[in-house]
Image (cartoon, helix red, strand yellow):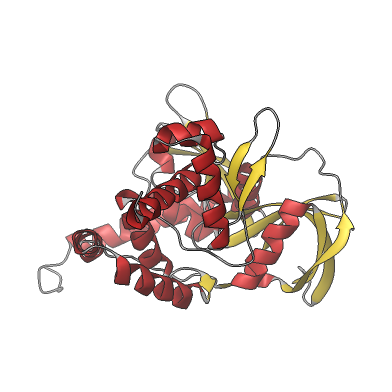
Amino acid sequence: MTVEATTERVLRLLALLQRRASWTAAELATELGVTARCVRRDVQRLRTLGYPVHAVSGVGGGYQLGAGTRLPPLLLDDEEAIATAVSLRLASGGTVAGAGEAALRALAKLDQVMPSRLRAEVRAVHGATETLIGPVAEIDAELLVTLARACRDAVRVRFTYPGHAGGERERTVEPIRMVTTGRRWYLMAWDVDRDDWRTFRLDRMRAAVATTWRFRAREHPDPVAFVRRSVTEAPYRHLARVRVHAQPDQVRALVPSQVGRVEDDRDGWCVLVVGGESLDWLAAHLARLTYEVEVLEPPELREAAGLLARRLAAMAGAASGRGVSGHRV
């Protein structure tokens, strides 16, 4: 067998190991059309090249591609290469500090080896796409890694965090999960000192360190639902509950999850819970939903809505009494 054929087979073996978590020697031999002994030799060739291929014995065992001391080259099929390149372009304008530059470096390497036909497809997608970027809170990538490892390893984390009354205090938490809304990153964790679940904004954390104190994960609420409730209620001076004459999915399409929470109701209505610093602001934004809205609480929101209605009526009356030039007719 020629060297070229052996190299091609080893590359096919590598692609198979990257495609699935575990393979038996018999499965790999069938896929490659060789003997199990040949598979063992090819696995050793990959190990010599720096790929950490682990052999697990026993029932359910087989060959697995593990993590090594350095990142080996990856084999990507056409769809994976296009998806990776598009994702890297998007990541270059993301919310993680330093990720943009790293994404551009990785994209340059991928673009250099990508076939021209795939490069053309990636550029076509990028050329037909515009990204609307609003104000975002940039996060240090090291902080993300620290918290992700702490969640995985179930170890406590210490950091300083601003309090409601001002100033910063040290917090010790048992982290469960990070949740992102697209604009901000949050950590759901058990606050050791307050003996309760809490949500923390990552952009407000300072000097975060993972300790060696391991904890046993306790039963916890759904992280996504918990963070959604926290970000729509806790930060605001006023919290409104209103009934909306629309299906929940119709309202969710208008109100982002980080702004309001939508609950099912009856008879074609749903309940929207939304917070704001101003009742006037809440009344104005609820009026823009284009659906019938019934205020449940607080009662002061009805007063703000009435005041807004009178202002709009006055504006409409003033407009009807003017000509095109703006003078009264």
Q: Residue at x 49, y 59 (%)?
A: 182
Spot occupied by residue 198 in the image (x, y as percentages of width and height): 75, 53
Q: Nearer the viewer, residue 115 or 270?
A: 115
Q: Is residue 134 left or right of residue 114?
A: right
Q: Residue furthest top?
A: 267
Spot occupied by residue 316 in the image (x, y as percentages of width and height): 26, 58
Asked whether residue 198 appears in the rendered view, the answer is no
Classify residue 89 by image quadrant: bottom left
Q: Residue furthest front?
A: 1
Asked whether residue 138 appears in the rendered view, the answer is yes
Q: Nearer the viewer, residue 94 or 63?
A: 63
Spot occupied by residue 211 in the image (x, y as percentages of width and height): 85, 64
Q: Quadrant of the C terminus?
A: bottom left
Q: Is residue 90 above or below residue 308?
A: below
Q: Is residue 47 left or right of residue 165?
A: left
Q: Nearer the viewer, residue 38 or 32?
A: 38
Q: Residue at x 38, y 46 (%)?
A: 289
Q: Nearer the viewer, residue 50 or 250?
A: 50
Q: Residue at x 72, y 54 (%)?
A: 151
